[in-house]
Amino acid sequence: MSKARAVSKRRAAVTVAAGATVLTMVAANGSAAFADHKSAATGAQIQQIHAIKPMYDVGVHVGTAKTSAAAVTGLKVFSKTVTDGGSFTYRMVGKDPTVVQATPATSVKTALVPVIIHFSNGLTWDPTLGDTCDATSAVTRTMNSPMVKKRTWTFGGTSVGKGQYSDAFQRASFYTQTKPTGINPGYHVNLAFTQLPAVTINVPNADAAFGTITCGNGHYAGVEINWLDNYIQTTLLPQLATQGYGPKTLPLFLLGNVVEYDTAPGNCCILGYHNALSTASSAQTYSVSMYDNTSLFAGSGDVSVLSHEIAEWMDDPFTDNPTKPWGNIGQVSGCQGNLEVGDPLSGTVFTQTMNGKAYHLQELAFVSWFYHQSPSTGVNGWYSNGGAFTTAAAPCP
């Protein structure tokens, strides 16, 4: 199976806790390759990347392959063309909320795959087990979170109905159509979750690194992202396909206190990403997220990364939805031109208590923010679900 290997990476500085160690490579004998280096000062900066995107697939432009593949695979998406100083066509998961739908709700079969990371030095990160970070496991917390369980949501005093957080966000983004008096009040994009057995990945020393935290096994892990993504594409996705989780479904790979880095540990830390593996006849979307107990990353905690990535998968499933350039906001330094709804508000989180746990969820940008729609189709006339954005994206030169 051919795989997408070229990736485009977006980086932004994120603050780590004072005195936290930077990632240390694992040596060939399983020990540390060099002594831990302490951060020099409070507020030391590392690099964060929230998403990677395939650009080319063995010489074939991925956008071309995915366009034909979407019709073949059956992942339910709709396509919309908007005018914003030019013509832009985007695809999102679900049915078109701007057109009257007889049955406006969509359900996507979703596999939550816990990933156990094991290093040759004996360190292991298992999201199915509780530890001193939290006696309840990352998997249990996630399955009991607003990303999986439904609840009634109110944004700025306006109810958007009952659903999972990503569903509530989408209803809020198209509130003109989904409100009780709109053309599709029953609109939903539901994820039908199944928790699958954990898979174990033994990471080679050349692609493994770790740093220090104060709970769990005392460390957080770093895995080189290109090695990990290749392993997912060539090993885990084919295995899932034999279990009925193919291109019509969404595999979500959940890590516990495990980040990725790009090529070298200094290019850290990637907390999650979504991607699409394309060939001429199929397009498999998937996502990787860390459940975060590290306390290292400002604006991150428990399922905040998952909230970022699921929403971005829903609104940009094939990672190729174009927009006018925007940037210098959230995790984006400089300009980018895509419909990644989490990036402009990375680090902006709020808490929502469910099943006795105060979960951290990231605020997200509405479609109207990207395409400069006035008035916004969003709830309260806003351009993000928490009201951080009350106007559309500023131009980015």
Image (tube, grey):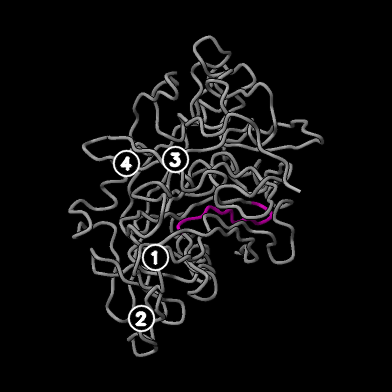
Frontmost of labels 1 and 3 is 1
Q: Earlier in the sequence, mark 3 or mark 2?
A: 2
What number is the disc on residue 359? 4
Q: Between residue 121 and residue 103, name the one nearer to us.
A: 121
Q: Residue 100: x and y, percent? A: 61, 16
Residue that extends furthest to the bottom in the rendered view of this protein: 29
Q: Nearer the viewer, mark 2 or mark 4?
A: 2
Dot 2 corresponds to which residue?
36
Boundaries of the magenta span: 271-281
Q: Residue at x 42, y 79 (%)?
A: 204
Q: Are marks 1 and 2 in contact (CB under 8 Å)?
A: no
Q: Is residue 334 left or right of residue 210?
A: right
Query: Which mark lies nearer to you, 4 or 3?
Result: 4
Q: Secondary structure at mark 4?
A: strand
Query: What is the x, y in percent for residue 62?
Result: 70, 55
**Which numbered disc covers residue 42?**
1
- Tell me the mark number nearer the camera, choosing from 3 and 2: 2
For disc 3, the neighbor class at 10 Å (few under 14, some 14 to 19, many from 20) is some
Q: Is residue 290 left or right of residue 128?
A: right
**Residue found at the very far right of the displayed protein:** 86
In whole angstroms, how far apart are the C-alphas of marks 4 and 1? Answer: 26 Å
Give the residue at mark 3: 109
Precedes in sequence: disc 1 or disc 2: 2
Magenta residue check for 236 = no
Name the main secondary structure of what is drawn in magenta. strand
Q: Is residue 278 magenta?
A: yes
